[in-house]
Amino acid sequence: MSDSDFSLLVELVGLLREADQRPGLKAAVEIKGSGDVKSKTYLVEARVEGSSYRTVRSDDWSKFEIVYQSDTHQTLIFEANDSPIIRDSEWRIPVATPELAMFRPLDLPMWGGPTDTHKIISVARSEENEFILELTMLGPDGDSDETYEVVVDSQLGYVSRMTWNYNNYTVKNLEIIGEADIWQIEL
C-alpha cells in the first residue's frame, strides 16, 4: 500500500468512527452469487431506535430477523415464533450477515485485525465522499490472487456495494431517516 493509500485509509477510518451518530438508514440489499444462482434481497435498517441494526431474511425455507445492538454488542436472532437466540460479543456480524456489516463498515474483517478474512491492498477516492477499497481474501497461505472491491460512502457511513466471499452486494432504494425528514435515494 502506498503512502497516499495509507493517508486515505486513515481519513476513511476517522470518518467511519462516527457512523453510529449519523442519521438512520433503510435499504434493500441485493445479493448475487456467481453462476446461475438466484439473487436474494434482504431488507436492512441501520441506526434506528438508537444503535440498532436489523435485517430480515426470507427465502423458500425460512424467514428470520437478526438485530444487532451496537451499544451492547449483542445480537438477537428471531426465527418464526421462537424465542430469540442471543449472541453476545463473540458473534461477529460479517460471518452470517454481511448485509448488516455494510452499514457498520468498521465491523468488516479487513482492517488489519488478527481474525480478519480480507486485507486492504489499495484505497482510492472516486468522489468527494466515496472511497474505493481493493481487497484480497486471506487464506491459510496468505493473500489470494483475486482482488475484490468495496465502495464506501463516508458521508453516510455505509458500503454502497461490495464483493464479499464470492457474492456481490448492492444497496438499493436507500432511505435516509433524519429527525423529521425522510429522503429517498434511488441507487
Image (tube, grey):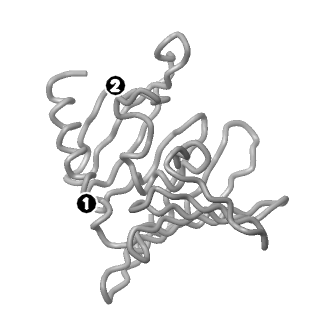
Local SS, label 1:
loop
Classed neighbour count for the residue bearing mark 1: other residues with Cα under 10 Å, few (<14), some (14–19), many (≥20): some
* Residue ID at (47%, 44%): 162
Residue 152 place in picture, x, y as percent = 34, 49
**As drawn, 162 above or below 40:** above
Mark 2 Cα shell of 10 Å, populated few (<14), some (14-19), many (≥20):
some
Q: Amino acid at mark 1?
A: Gln
Circle number at residue 121:
2
x, y percent for residue 20: 32, 63
Residue 107 lies, in percent from the top left, at 42, 46
Number of the label disc, if any, that sits on residue 122: none
Q: Quadrant of residue 51?
A: bottom left
Where disc 2 sits, the SS reads strand
Amino acid type, callout 2: Ile
The disc at residue 155 is: 1
Examine the image and state in which quarter residue 131 appears: top left
Q: Quadrant of the N terminus?
A: top left
Is residue 97 found left or right of 185 in the rendered image? right
Give the position of the C terminus as an image quadrant.
bottom left
Q: Which residue is drawn at the image coordinates 23% and 45% (left, top)? A: 12
Q: Residue furthest top?
A: 141
Q: Residue at x 55, y 14 (%)?
A: 140
Residue at image coords 47%, 51%: 101
Above or below 128: residue 48:
below
- Image spot of residue 21 (x, y percent): 27, 67
